[in-house]
Each structure stands twice: as C-alpha cells, then as structure tokens.
Image: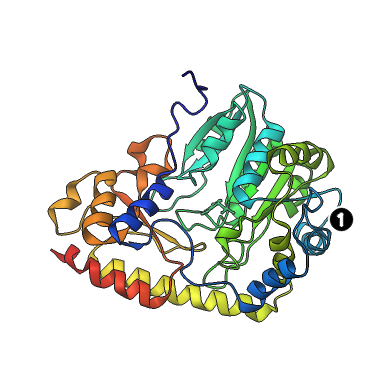
Amino acid sequence: MQTAHRFDHIGESVIREMTRLAIRSQAINLSQGFPDFGPPPEVAQAAVDAIQGGLNQYTITWGYPPLREKLAEIYTQRLGWSVEPDEHIVVTCGVTEALAAAMLAILNPGDEILILDPAHETFRPGAKLADARAVSVVLKSPDFRIEREALEAAITPHTKAMILNTPHNPSGRVFDEEEITTVIELVTKYDLVLITDEIYDRILYDGRVHVSPGGLEPLRERTITIGGFGKTYAVTGWRLGYAIAPTPLARALKPAHDFLTICAATPLQAAALAALNLPESYYEQMREAYHARRALMADILTELGFIFTLPQGAYYILADYRHLPIPQAQWNANRFARWMTTEVGVAVVPGPNFYANPEDGEGLIRFAYPKKLETLHAAAERMDRLKG
Ligand SMILES: Cc1ncc(COP(=O)(O)O)c(C=O)c1O
C-alpha cells in the first residue's frame, strides 16, 4: 500500500510515546507536560452546566461567541489594537491546531520557517503538513539566548515566517527585551510573519511579566498570536487554544481551521469563558504553587547531581545527566530516558527529541513538574538510586 511521503521522516510523538511507556511501566510521569491535579472547581462545573444546559452542538466555526468577546476584550488590551471577535479570533482544538492552521495559512510548498531549537515537537511536523521546510536555529545551552547573527544567518530568500515560543518549552527561557528587539528587527527587515506560541503566558517566575510580541508596534501587522487554556487552567485534555491575528492573516487562518475541525468543543468553550472570568487571585495562587514546584524539582535534581539552568517560565527543567555517579550516565539520552522510565520508574523525555539535529540534545533529559508536591517527592524517592 502506497502512503504519502509527508511523514516519512517524522515518527510519532516521542513525548506521547514516553507517556505510554510510563503507563506500561507504572512510572511516575514527568515526561508529558500535563498536571496531575484538576482545574478550579467552578471551571469544571461550568463544563457540566454547559452540557446539561444544552450547549452540545457545533458552535460558530471561529468559536463560541461569548468566549470570543471575552478574548477580544483581553487581547485588545494586551496587543494595543482593536481586536474584533468576528474578525480577528479563531478558537482552535488546542495550540497544536492553532499552530498547524497558522502554518497552513501562510506557508506555500518550498517556503521556509525558522524554528528555535530546542523546540516543542509539534513545530516541525506542522511545517511538514504545509509542505514547507523547517529551518532550525540552535539556542546554545546553558543560556539558550537568541543571537542575532545565528538567526540572521538562517534567513534565505525562501524564509517566510518564524515561530517564537515564550515562555519557552523546554529551556524555561522568557526571552528578554534585547532578544525580542532582535526578533523585531529581523522579522521586519526580511518581511516575515511571526507566529507566537504563548501557551505558558501565565506561568512565569521571580516577578517576570509576559509581553505578547504581537503587541509591539512593528509586529502588530505581521504576528499571529497563539495562546491556550490547557496549561493555565489544568485542562490539557480539553484541547482548547486560539489564534489572534490582523485581518489579512486571520482571513487565511479561518478556512484552515474550518476545514480541519469545524469548531472546538462547544461546552468546553463555555467553560473556558468561566476560566477567563476567574479572579486575579487564581493566577497569583497558581504562580505561587509553581514556584514551590520549581523549587522542589530543582532541589531534587541538584542533590542528585544534574546540571541545569533554573527556568524563568513554563514548567520544565532540561537537565544534563552526564555527571551522575552511575554507569548509565554515559549512555545516550534516548537509552537513558527509557531506562529512567522502565527501571527507575520516573518517565522523562530525551533531549534529542527537541532538536532537528539530535546530537544537539545529547546528554539532556526533560523533566515536567506540573505535579502535586507529593508526586515530586515520590519521584525523588525513586531517583535515589541515581546517587550510585
Ligand atoms: C510550547 C508548546 N506548544 C504547544 C503545546 C501543545 O498545546 P495544546 O495541548 O494546547 O495543543 C505544548 C504542550 O506541551 C507546548 O509545550
């Protein structure tokens, strides 16, 4: 049977594979980035109410109207231009769909899109779906800084767009003003479209403040701003995200979304509106809880001898295991991550998974810590054997 060549060099998601391996091995799952706690009760109740109240059919393709109105209000403030619910917003089935729809909307076959490695594993396949070429620019460990020279060197006459994920998974970087200025200069100089992935926009540490690049004047006309609900409200299984873009870009996005999915789940969109109506105290408590999780995870890994940089945002630690006092520390990252999962009982993601050139991620594994503190303590107990 002949199948398409589109996915010849793209296997299944390694992150999801690690979750399946974790389930089979009864490992504590610190691989895939999802919480082991639920959403706020009022958000869960809003979903139940929506289903029982009859919101069970397709909603408008661009999203449940009251949700889009609320998003328009929030993003008009954030982006500094008048975001119209009917014109500029598309509610999608997760950030994953928003990214794929954005790439389908702007890339022609043969176009190139810049991706900063390490990168979330959905970016490259998204470009493939659009028959475009993902061009990687490696952010060097341990600082993971965007450097102008490296970024500019990757731009060719075929470069059409760039994806910027901030706060960044898996490095934990929140790109600073100097780096964003570099992005602004190059995106405008080379007439690119910027696609932002801001799924961790509410998970920042040490008083950092999230800035949506699409709100900065030179980028307003050329940015597709993407956000999601899964991480902020602990509902990754609800598959809800959105894209916000100026009219010409939104017009191209809409048919991509329409014919991929028709619409995201209606009752869950109603519950997402309840989430957006949560008081500011919800976010303050969530940030506090994530500071505690980050501190615990960092203490555990430091004590064991992992080397890493403390995340500035999001909820991952990308750690170098090569100095652990055990023979397995000499293994490659794929073998080490699988051993961690099946033998140690703590599932992690191998670093090479985040790089176009797997060599660049050798010696690294990613821990996800959106977990109850007791889960992280239990993982620490299991990892005791890494002390040799
Ligand atoms: C940077 C980044 N983008 C996108 C996604 C996927 O988002 P969603 O579950 O909303 O599709 C993730 C999930 O971990 C992520 O870390």
| Residue 157 coordinates in the image, percent (x, y) | 63, 22
Residue 121 visible to the viewer:
yes
| Residue 32 coordinates in the image, percent (x, y) | 43, 56
**Foreground: 319 or 380?**
380
> Dividing the picture into quarters, in which one does residue 63 lie?
bottom right
Residue highlighted by disc 1 = 82
User: Which kind of residue does numbered mark 1 sit on?
Assistant: Ser
> Dividing the picture into quarters, in which one does residue 310 lie?
bottom left
Number of labelled discs?
A: 1
**Foreground: 13 or 265?**
265
Q: Is residue 156 above or below residue 259?
A: above
Q: Is residue 359 above or below residue 303?
A: above
Residue extending furthest toward the top: 2
Q: Is residue 279 above or below residue 85?
A: below
Quarter of the figure that contains the C terminus:
bottom left
Mark 1 Cα shell of 10 Å, populated few (<14), some (14-19), many (≥20): few
126 with respect to 121 (left or right): right
Residue at image coords 80%, 64%: 70
Residue at image coords 86%, 48%: 87
| Residue 253 coordinates in the image, percent (x, y) | 75, 40
| Residue 222 coordinates in the image, percent (x, y) | 75, 41
Residue at image coords 72%, 44%: 223
Residue at image coords 52%, 31%: 135
Residue 191 visible to the viewer:
no
